[in-house]
Image (cartoon, helix red, strand yellow):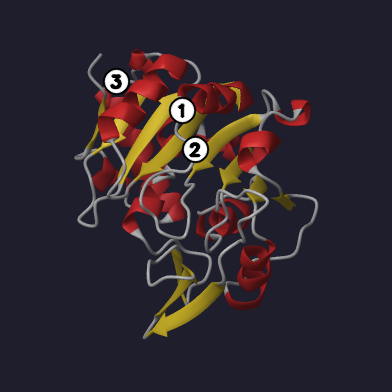
Amino acid sequence: MTRKKTTAAQELPEVSVSDDGEVRYLHLGTPWIQGSMLVAEPFEIELEYVQRMMAWLLFADPAKVSKGHAMQLGLGSAAITKFCYKKLRVCTTAIELNPQVVAVCRQWFKLPQDGAKLRVVLADAAQEIRNPMWLGTVDALAVDLYDHEAAAPVLDSTDFYADCRALLTDTGCMTVNLFGRASSYERSLQSMAQAFGSDALWAFKPTREGNTVVLAQRTPARPKRDELVQRAETIEDRWGLPARKWLRVFKPVAA
């Protein structure tokens, strides 16, 4: 879920792990939590905001989910990557800058080795998403890019979000975690609106911890409430995510 913005003179932060009862946490050189895992259920999603990053399922045909392609920018503790791969059984790609993060996720967070439907790419997300091989191939894009201080998103410009939009299939969605003392929800939303169109955006209310998840659709759609309720019931019954609860705090962004 994180990446470190670097220059030649900068070094990637040290990765560490801590346990607190039933939950294991990932850190990048500070006490900030960069990801978590339920030790007894390593392929479930523990953090509420990370669960909300899966809201793209509300706009997907459940019968076709496993045939799609999910991509995460920033691996974090691999919660989204593992859920997409193991629970949704979807072809999954994660792009991560720090090789230590990948190694720690494999050793301590049950991240499987790469295979036919799972690949972790060591690269700078801003550069890698411009690789022509990815364009128009992604059905669900999760963006959770923070440095070790978690003060604000590392990549948050209109140009970056335009590059994200270019990754998506016609029915694809991007979800973004907005968090941090130096972040600006309105500025980020404006950048996304310029790239996707204001009618393409949906947003959750902030979690208690202050994470706001925003969803952007490649092709704007406004499903009827009954359709969303039915889809939420399917998501909850099939994959165990609290999708019915989402609908109480998830709305289209006013244009």
Badge number at residue 155:
2
Determine contact: label 1, label 3, CB under 8 Å: no
Residue 224, disc: 3
Q: Is residue 104 above or below residue 240?
A: below
Task: Give the residue drawn at x 56%, y 60%.
Answer: 78
Task: Kindly check if marks 2 and 3 are in contact, taking CB atoms under 8 A apart as contact.
Answer: no
* Residue 229 in picture, x, y percent from top left: 29, 34
**One can see residue 147 in this view:** yes
Q: Nearer the viewer, residue 59 or 213?
A: 213
Disc 2 marks a residue whose amino acid type is: Leu
Can residue 241 be spotted in the picture?
Answer: no
Depth order, front residue of 42/188: 188
Q: What secondary structure is found at the residue carrying circle 3?
A: loop
Cα distance between the residues tagged 2 and 3:
33 Å
Spot the residue most to the bottom.
Answer: 21
Toward the front, the furthest residue is 9
Return the mark for residue 157: 1
Q: Which of pointers 2 and 3 lies earlier in the amino acid sequence?
A: 2
